[in-house]
Image (tube, rainbow, N blue to C red):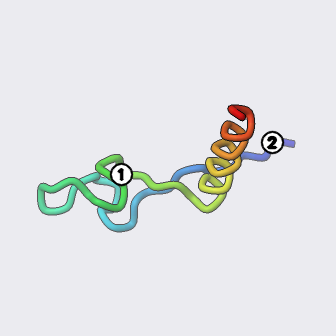
């Protein structure tokens, strides 16, 4: 069984362009994508794991 988790999705503010009116989109910082809720949870878990292993 193949279960895939989408970590990123298209930025709704700039529709994936990375820019709005020629300026970098603040929501995605010009990448055109933002983290999904699952992506945010995984990133937070990894950050916490790294912090714990540093001490």
Could you tell me how far apart the alpha carbons at marks 1 and 2 are, in whole angstroms? 27 Å
Position of residue 16 in the picture relative to residue 44 (left or right): left
Which residue in the structure is indicated by mark 2?
A: 2
Q: Residue furthest right?
A: 1
Residue 21 image point, x, y percent: 13, 62
Work out whether mark 1 precedes mark 2 in sequence or the reverse, and give the earlier one: 2
User: Can you give x and y, in whole percent of width and height, for residue 28 in the image?
Assistant: 36, 55
Q: Is residue 15 above or below residue 6?
A: below
Q: Which mark is residue 40?
A: none
> Which residue occupies 33% across, 67% down?
13
Q: Quadrant of the C terminus?
A: top right
Residue annotated with mark 1? 32
Residue displayed at 72% across by 46% down: 4
Foreground pick, 51 / 11: 51
Q: Secondary structure at mark 1?
A: loop
How far from the left and from the top, in percent, is residue 34? 46, 55
Mark 1 or mark 2, whichever is nearer to me: 1
The kind of secondary structure element at disc 2 is: loop
Q: Residue furthest top?
A: 54
Residue nearest the viewer, comparing 10 with 44: 44
Residue extending farthest front: 55
Q: Is residue 54 above or below residue 42?
A: above
Tell me the residue at 42%/52% (across/down): 33
Judge left or right: residue 13 versus residue 7.
left
Mark 2 closeness class: few <14, some 14–19, many ≥20 residues within 10 Å: few
Horizontal and vertical percent position of residue 20: 19, 61
Q: Mark 1 packing: few (<14 Cα in 10 Å), some, or many (20+)? A: many
């Amino acid at each position: 069984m193949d279960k895939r988790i989408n970590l990123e999705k298209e930025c709704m503010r700039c529709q994936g362009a990375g820019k709005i009116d020629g300026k970098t989109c603040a929501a995605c910082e010009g990448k055109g994508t933002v983290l999904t809720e699952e992506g945010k949870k995984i990133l937070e878990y990894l950050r916490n794991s790294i912090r714990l292993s540093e001490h």
